Structure formats: structure tokens, C-alpha cells
Image (cartoon, helix red, strand yellow):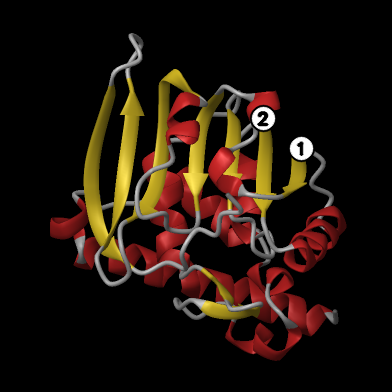
Amino acid sequence: MSDIAGVEFVSLREEMVDQVIFYAGKIAEETGHPQISERVLDVMRHVPRHEFVPPNVQTMAYVDSPLPIGQGNSISQPFIVALMTDLLDVGPTDQVLEIGTGLGYQAAILAALSDTVYTVEIVAELAREAERSLTSQGLDNIHMGIGDGSIGWPENAPFDRILVAAAPELIPTSLLHQLKPGGKMIVPAGIEDAQQLILVEKDRNGSLRTEERLHVHFSALEVTH
């Protein structure tokens, strides 16, 4: 990448973040979350989204819009990435599980905010491409798995935070079990055209509380069982 292109991408990322800030305020009444934390915004200013989309859509990488990434999947709109990440309130010592790696952009965001990320993708071709992109960015605190994300990653559970980037009709009980007491999960759930972005919190006694935050449209969570 030329120095000129590098400077251009920095400017485009700043414009993308400005759009995220604007949109967060615009729909604050619906989300109950009028501001994205500066910590999350700063990470989004630095993670190169264009490295996590196919070459044919790189010129659109910093538009606040979902983009196709192949295999019938898409990368989420930057605002949705920001909102989901901020609602999780990821801490620097957290162990995070992500379901639905795609090409790795959300994993890269989470990796910059947490201690360790475990990410699962059911489409092997996407997972391999994501691993290449994440490795090229020097991210060494991400562990990649290929398989059915609805069963989570029990060998490394429990997790402080869980982010689900595909929509089950119902939140999988396996993921609820793998959430630590005191932990949070963000997940789009529901049938097509009636999905809600849901924040799940598990208190220190293991009781669950759910809160719907936004009507969304995600690809369905694929399962193998």
C-alpha cells in the first residue's frame, strides 16, 4: 500500500467514526445508548477495515454500511460494530468469545480491547481468510476455531464477554452456560425481519437479565445439529 493510500485510509476512518458518532446520537432514543465510548472509537480509528473485506469492495470499506464478504455473508455496518462492542463494555483483562468471525474485523476490534479473543466461524473458507488477515495485522491474542458457533467453545469457557455476530432464533443455552457470572453477552436474536439486538447480563449469582436494544437484520446463525 502506498503512503498516499495510507493517509487516505486514515482520513476515511476518521470520517467513518464521525458517522458512527452521529448515528449513535440520532437513534439514541431507540438504543438507550447515545454515545459510543472514546475507547471503542479510538480502536475503530486504527483498525484497518479495508483489510477485512474482499478487494472488490475495499473502496467502500469506510462507508457506514454492511458489505458482502462472500459465501452469502456480510461484514456488519461500522455503527453496529461500535454499538455491540460498547454495550459489551470489554475490559483489558477479559476473555472474549466471538461467534461468527466472518473475515475478522470484529475480532480485531475485540482483540485491541481485551486480553484474549476466541472466535468461531462455521464457513472454513472465511475462517482461513480471516486468520490470514488477523495474522498480517500482528494480532497474536486471537484463537480461531472452525465449526458450529452455537455450541460455543466449551474447552475455554467460561468467558467474561460473548459477542454473537449472527442471529439465532433463540439464544443458545450453551452460550448462556459459558458466560461467567458477572459477564455480558450481546446477540441478535429472532426470526428474520423480527430480530432484536439483545444485551444479556449474568449477575454474580448466575441469574440472567435480558434487554432489547435495537431492531436489526443479521444473517441467520448456521448450526450443524
Judge whether residue 37 can be spotted in this image: no
Residue 52, position as x, y percentages in the image: 70, 69
Image position of 64 with respect to 178: above or below: below
Packing grade of label 2 (10 A; few <14, some 14-19, many >=20) is some
Dot label at residue 115:
2
Q: Nearer the viewer, residue 120 or 15?
A: 120
Image position of 77 with respect to 213: above or below: below
Residue 174, position as x, y percentages in the image: 49, 32
How far apart are the two marked residues, 1 and 2, measured between alpha carbons?
Answer: 7 Å
Packing grade of label 1 (10 A; few <14, some 14-19, many >=20) is some
| Residue type at the position of mark 1 | Asn
Q: Residue at x 80, y 66 (%)?
A: 129
Q: Residue at x 50, y 58 (%)?
A: 221
For label 2, the SS is loop
Relative to 146, 70 lies left or right: left
Residue 140, position as x, y percentages in the image: 82, 41
